[in-house]
Amino acid sequence: MSDNTENTKLPEGVKTLLGILALAFLFELFKAGSFAPSPAKLIQIGGTNSRLVLAEPVYFLRIFTALFLHGNIIHLLSNSIAILIGGPFVERLVGKYWFWVIFLYSAAFGSVASLFLSKPYIVSVGASGGIMGIFSAALVLTNLKVKPEYRQNLNIIFLQSTIPSLIPLSRGIDYAAHTGGAIGGAILGLFLLAFWPSNQIRPSENILVHLLLVVFLMATVLAFYLTVFRF
């Protein structure tokens, strides 16, 4: 199979991520009975909120659940499109496991930023922090690992996707989560370079990347049990 054929196929990691987000939305639909759950319903099924965390610190664990939820079907579709824009490039560059690490931990970082920086009445849900992490990691890795002749076009694409999402022009958008996710993605992109031998096309998929994914999965299950299932 040629490289051109491989580049036209949607990578496995991106497809898996989109499938998980779609299943999570079906869970929302089942629990909330609506394609646009109310803020109260979003809190019941895993959204984050600073007042909730202040009242009971265990709800801080929801930084691991909120990223899988969306405010409505349009929110899910727009985030899915954004993943399709940046996700395939990053996955082909670093492999599906590091791609998942960048997305998940950037999203969690965005949720933390939202808890500390957003107004108390904001209920934070969505994959936007992880998406911003994908774009900012792509910018870091493009300028450090991609051949110079390709950098300009890639930088334009990723900057056009990143900068507008950081400018607070619209109400109802969690810009704190966007900013936190972007910072997290840049940090993870730099962190990844430590596991990227100069003589290899991709970074090493060693025990660390699998451990990071297992830890995140365990934290998500624990968060769901302690703060959603028992809500």
Image (cartoon, rainbow, N blue to C red):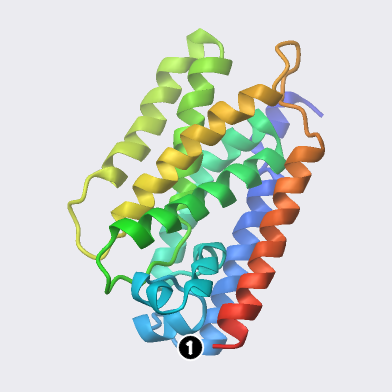
Q: Position of residue 208 (x, y in %)?
A: 76, 39
Q: Which of 82 and 195 is in front in this view?
A: 195
Q: Residue 40 lies in what quarter of the image? A: bottom left
Whether residue 27 appears in this view of the structure is no
Q: Quadrant of residue 79?
A: bottom left
At x 70%, y 60%, the residue is 217
Q: Nearer the viewer, residue 43 or 30?
A: 43
Percent of width and height locating residue 132: 43, 44
Q: How crowded is mark 1: few (under 14 residues within 10 Å), some or many (20 or more)?
A: some
**Can residue 39 be seen in this snapshot?**
yes
Location of residue 29 with respect to 57 vertically, above or below: below
- Image position, residue 89 (x, y; %): 57, 33
Q: Quadrant of the N terminus?
A: top right
Q: Which residue is drawn at 75% across and 11% down?
A: 199
Residue that numbered label 1 is attached to: 32
Identified at 46% across, 78% down, the residue is 56
Q: Residue at x 72, y 63 (%)?
A: 218
Relative to 226, does residue 89 appear above or below in the rendering?
A: above
Taking the image as shown, residue 9 lies to the left or right of residue 143, namely right
- In the rendered image, the quadrant that contains the C terminus is bottom right
Is residue 168 toward the left or the right of residue 189 in the image?
A: left
Q: Is residue 129 left or right of residue 164?
A: right
